[in-house]
Each structure stands twice: as structure tokens, then as C-alpha cells.
Image: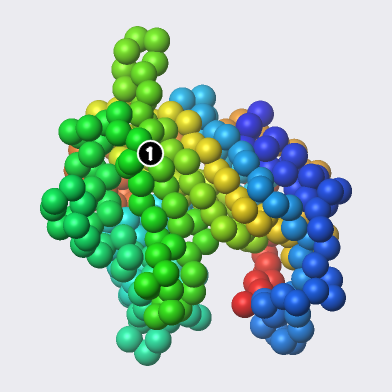
């Protein structure tokens, strides 16, 4: 059965059984329909580890929209956009202004050129250049949580830091690994979406470098379940698990900036029913 399912269930049980209840505390989010405070049960410092050589970490308890997850990754790291009209889903619509911009956040920050090793270069171009020419560097990082951009951004990024690290397998092949750091996560709405999209990013970069996509470590600083989501979570983690789907990329794409969602191949994805009408705190 899917390791992603098992990790998700363990995480949810841990939050529900050992987490901190924020009810009556000072919290920012509210429920859009009533304006009431949206309280959570939260756990600090959740770490999950996925090995893409063993399986792709998509939940089978319910379906994750993998092509939409990839589309957002392309929007941020390939298009380096902060405009919702460059994105095919509508997840950021409520934060956009009349031109479609979400301000100085996400792709805007990745695309800003800064002086790195004597060269003006943006963050993603730096990652690709270093992995090609200096793969065992310990400084191959992208960071979207930069104070100078936060005030003019519509929202602070959730997954904000990626650290790349190259190892070798027993045959001497280069393996690309990634650590993803996330400041805050709505577990029901976003957990597997974030896991899958950064797994796809790791696969994209690895393929362009001629490397094997290896381990992904996902650190969540504040993993929380909203009060309205608790019954949904309890039902979800009692569901049947299925084998993980087979997920790959078209092998002829070698240019990171050439990937489209048409290049994602998803096979044998068995999953439970979707949970509809999940309330989102804003």
C-alpha cells in the first residue's frame, strides 16, 4: 500500500492526539462565510520523508490533482510569474488585484536577479547552473521568504525554501535529493498537494541534470487541522489504501523551462472518493 497514505495517517493521528488547540487564542484566519475565527489543532515541527525511487507520494485515500499541482510549480519556478492569468487553476484568485497580480511573492521572488558568485542571475537559474557545474555544493537553495518583498506581496509563501543535495547510489549514479521547508500548512486542503508538487519539481530538475530523483524531506513548522475539518480528517484516515500510482515525465524533455503539464504521465491511480466543499479559512 502507499507509503504516502501511511505517513499522512500517522501525521493526522499525531496532530489530533497530541496537538495544541488554538481555540480562544489570538489567531488571524477567519471563515469566509461567517467571519468567525478559524481555530486549529496544531503540531510543531512535522517531518515526513519520501523516497521517489520507491514510489511517487500521491495519496490514494482521495485523489490529488497532479497536473494542476505541476501547473503551479511551473507557474512559480519556470514561468516565475505572480499573475493568476498565467495559472490554469483558481487557487490564488482571491488574493489577486484587478490586473491578476499577487504582488511581490512566489514566482516574482524566484525570478528576481541578484549577484551570485559575480553574476546577475535569478534563483532557479542559479540552481540549474550549480547542479550542472558544481553538483556537490551545499549552497544550492531557493528562498521565497525574503523580508524586502513581503510587504508588497498579497500573502507570505507557505512552502518557501528548497535545498538541493546530490548523493551517489551503489552504482555510482548521481541522485538528486531535496528538502522542502514550509512555515504553515492546512493539512486537509494542502498537505498532499504540496508533497506532490515538490516531488514533481524534484523529478523535473533531476531529469534535466541526468540524475535520479531520490529523497524528499518535507518539514512543516506549523501543521494544523482546522476545527471544521476534523470530521473530514477522521473519515479520511479510516479509508482503504491502494498501491501508489506510477508517475513519470516524458523522457525526451531535458530543458527545465520546456516542461508542460502534458509531459506528466500518471498511470494506475486508484483512489477513494474526493472530499467536496472543503471550507477554506482566509
- Front-most of 180 and 12? 180
Q: Residue at x 75, y 48 (%)?
A: 12
Q: Secondary structure at mark 1?
A: strand
Residue 191 appearing in the image = yes
Could you tell me residue 101's position as x and y percent?
35, 80
**Residue extending furthest left?**
119
Q: Quadrant of residue 255?
A: top left
> Viewed as shown, does residue 135 lie left or right of 143?
left
User: Which sits in the foreground, 151 or 159?
Assistant: 151
Against 143, is 267 above or below?
Answer: above
Quadrant location, the C terminus: bottom right
Residue at 31% from the left image edge and 17% from the top image edge? 173
> Could you say where residue 73 lies in the image, as x and y percent from the top left?
38, 55
The answer to which image quadrant residue 206 occupies is: top left
Counting from the top left corner in percent of width and height, residue 227 is at: 80, 67
Residue displayed at 47% across by 41% down: 179
Crowdedness of circle 1 by 10 Å Cα count: few (<14), some, many (20+)? Answer: many
For the N terminus, the quadrant is top right
140 versus 159 height, above or below: above
Q: Is residue 152 left or right of residue 218?
A: left
Residue ID for mark 1: 164
Which residue does the image show at 57% across and 46% down from the upper left? 219
Q: Which quadrant of the view contains residue 232?
A: bottom right
Name the spot of residue 31 as percent of width and height, x first: 71, 79
Amino acid at each position: 500500500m502507499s507509503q504516502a497514505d501511511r505517513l499522512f495517517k500517522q501525521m493526522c493521528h499525531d496532530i489530533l492526539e497530541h496537538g495544541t488547540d488554538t481555540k480562544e487564542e489570538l489567531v488571524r484566519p477567519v471563515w469566509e462565510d461567517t467571519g468567525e475565527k478559524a481555530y486549529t489543532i496544531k503540531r510543531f515541527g512535522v517531518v515526513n520523508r519520501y523516497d521517489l525511487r520507491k514510489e511517487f507520494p500521491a495519496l490514494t485515500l482521495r485523489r490529488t490533482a497532479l497536473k494542476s499541482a505541476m501547473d503551479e510549480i511551473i507557474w512559480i519556478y519556470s514561468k516565475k510569474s505572480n499573475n493568476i492569468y498565467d495559472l490554469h487553476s483558481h487557487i490564488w484568485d482571491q488574493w489577486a488585484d484587478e490586473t491578476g497580480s499577487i504582488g511581490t511573492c512566489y514566482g516574482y521572488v524566484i525570478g528576481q536577479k541578484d549577484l551570485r558568485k559575480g553574476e546577475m542571475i535569478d534563483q532557479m537559474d542559479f540552481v540549474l547552473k550549480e547542479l550542472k557545474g558544481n553538483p556537490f555544493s551545499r549552497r544550492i537553495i531557493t528562498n521565497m521568504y525574503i523580508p524586502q518583498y513581503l510587504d508588497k506581496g498579497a500573502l507570505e509563501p507557505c512552502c518557501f525554501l528548497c535545498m538541493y543535495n546530490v548523493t551517489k547510489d551503489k552504482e555510482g549514479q548521481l541522485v538528486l535529493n531535496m528538502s522542502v521547508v514550509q512555515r504553515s500548512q492546512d493539512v486537509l486542503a494542502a498537505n498532499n498537494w504540496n508533497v506532490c508538487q515538490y516531488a514533481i519539481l524534484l523529478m523535473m530538475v533531476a531529469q534535466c541534470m541526468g540524475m535520479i530523483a531520490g529523497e524528499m524531506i518535507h518539514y512543516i513548522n506549523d501543521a494544523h487541522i482546522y476545527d471544521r475539518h476534523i470530521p473530514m480528517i477522521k473519515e479520511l484516515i479510516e479509508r482503504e489504501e491502494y498501491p501508489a500510482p506510477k508517475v513519470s515525465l516524458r523522457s525526451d524533455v531535458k530543458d527545465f523551462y520546456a516542461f508542460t503539464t502534458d509531459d506528466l504521465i500518471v498511470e494506475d491511480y486508484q483512489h477513494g472518493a474526493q472530499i467536496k466543499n472543503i471550507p477554506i479559512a482566509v
